[in-house]
Amino acid sequence: MPRMQNVQQQRLSAKELKKKKKKKKARMLAPVPSKLAKEQKHFIDYKDIETLSKFTSGVGKLLSRKRAGTNAREQQMVREAVKLSRFMALLPYVSK
């Protein structure tokens, strides 16, 4: 019997060690100022191709909010403006 108790104690200690493992701390990233706020643009026009091309990748995909540096409302405006400018044939849907 004493041997059985010793094995159980070892198992408990192994479980306790797993629980006590240190969790990695999440990195706190500094808030990125919006590119549109820097340029003091409150509205994105579908005819402003220079600005819209900054928010698309080389292939023609829209950049994510994190990469573009926009907040949710600005990203919505960019998305709608890009869609409209593609429909009006000012921006390509896909570039090679």
Image: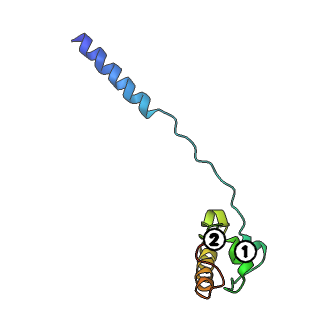
What residue does disc 1 label? 36
Which of the pair 7/37 is nearer the observer?
37
Q: Earlier in the sequence, mark 2 or mark 1?
A: 1
Helix or strand or loop: what does disc 2 sit on?
loop
Amino acid type, mark 1: Leu
Q: Is residue 60 above or below residue 66?
A: below
Tell me which colouring the rendered structure shows: rainbow
Tell whether 27 sits left or right of 9. right
Residue at (25%, 11%) from the top-left corner? 2
Tell whether 26 sits left or right of 11. right
Q: Residue 66's image quarter?
A: bottom right
Q: Residue 74's image quarter?
A: bottom right
Residue 32 location in percent, x, y? 70, 62
Q: Residue 65's image quarter?
A: bottom right
Residue sitting farthest toward the bottom: 88
Tell whether 38 sits left or right of 81. right
Q: Residue 71 carries which label?
A: 2
Residue 62 location in percent, x, y? 60, 70
Is the C terminus in the top left, top right, bottom left or bottom right quadrant? bottom right
Residue 6 location in percent, x, y? 30, 15
Q: In this view, does 68 lie above or below 5?
A: below
Helix or strand or loop: what does disc 1 sit on?
helix
Residue sitting farthest toward the top: 2
Residue sitting farthest toward the front: 96
Q: How crowded is mark 1: few (under 14 residues within 10 Å), some or many (20 or more)?
A: some
Q: Residues within 10 Å of mark 2 (few under 14, many from 20)?
A: some
Marks 2 and 1, how far apart at CA: 9 Å
Query: In the rendered structure, are the residues bearing label 2 and label 1 in contact, judged by CB atoms less than 8 Å apart?
Result: no
Which of the pair 16/50 is nearer the observer?
50
Which of the pair 92/72 is nearer the observer?
92
